[in-house]
Image (cartoon, rainbow, N blue to C red):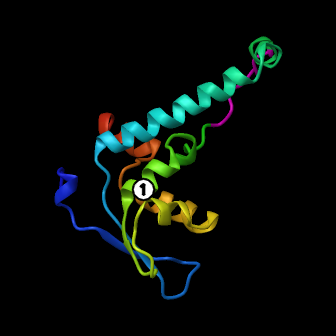
Amino acid sequence: MALTGKTTPRQVAIPHEQGQWMSFRRLPWPVLLAAEQKRTAAAIKNVAELGSEVREMFQSATPRAAAPELKEKDPADTYDRAIILRAGIVAWSYEAEVDTEAVDDLDEETADWAFREILKPAVRSEEERTDRFFPAP
C-alpha cells in the first residue's frame, strides 16, 4: 500500500534473542529523507574536520586504471540510525514501553539488526532500481 500510515506493522522475531520480537512500521518518505539528510550532513562535517592536509592528499591521489567493482550500498552509510529506529519500532516484547529513551538503550547488536529490518521494505538493490527503468526482455 502506498499510504504507510495505513499498513499493518510487521512483527519479526529477534534472531539473537530467543522468544523476543519487535514490530516495525513501514517508513514514509519524509522520515527516510530526514534520515538521509542527517547522515549526509554528518559525513560532510567529518570530511571538513579532517583538515586541509588530509583533504589535499585524497584530492591529489592518482586515480586507479580500472574502476573498483561496485557493491551494494550499506544502509548505514546512507541513513541516520537513530531516526530510523525511533520512527520504525512500534512495539516489542520487552517490558519497557517503546519510547525514545528505550530505543536509545538498545544494545548494538539489536539496534543494528532492527535498523536493517526496518529498512528492508524501503531500500531497493541497484538491480531492482535499474530493472524498473530497463526491464529485462
Q: Main secondary structure of the magenta part?
A: loop
The kind of residue on which mark 1 rests is: Arg
- Position above or below: 25 against 2: below
- Residue 65 is left or right of residue 114, and the answer is right
Q: Residue at x 44, y 41 (%)?
A: 35
Question: In this orientation, which residue lies closer to the viewer: 124 or 134?
Answer: 124
Q: Is residue 88 visible?
A: yes
Q: Is residue 122 magenta?
A: no
Residue 15 image offset from top left, x and y in percent: 54, 78
Q: Which of the 4 image quadrants contains residue 111? A: bottom right
Per the image, label 1 sits on a secondary structure element best described as helix
Residue 25 image offset from top left, x and y in percent: 31, 61
* Classed neighbour count for the residue bearing mark 1: other residues with Cα under 10 Å, few (<14), some (14–19), many (≥20): some
Q: Is residue 67 magenta?
A: yes
- Residue 57 is left or right of residue 68, and the answer is right
Question: In this orientation, which residue lies closer to the viewer: 46 or 72?
Answer: 46
- Position above or below: 66 against 71: above
For disc 1, the marked residue is: 86
- Residue 26 is left or right of residue 85, and the answer is left
Q: Is residue 136 visible?
A: no
Magenta residues, start to end: 61-69
Question: In this orientation, which residue lies closer to the viewer: 31 or 101?
Answer: 101
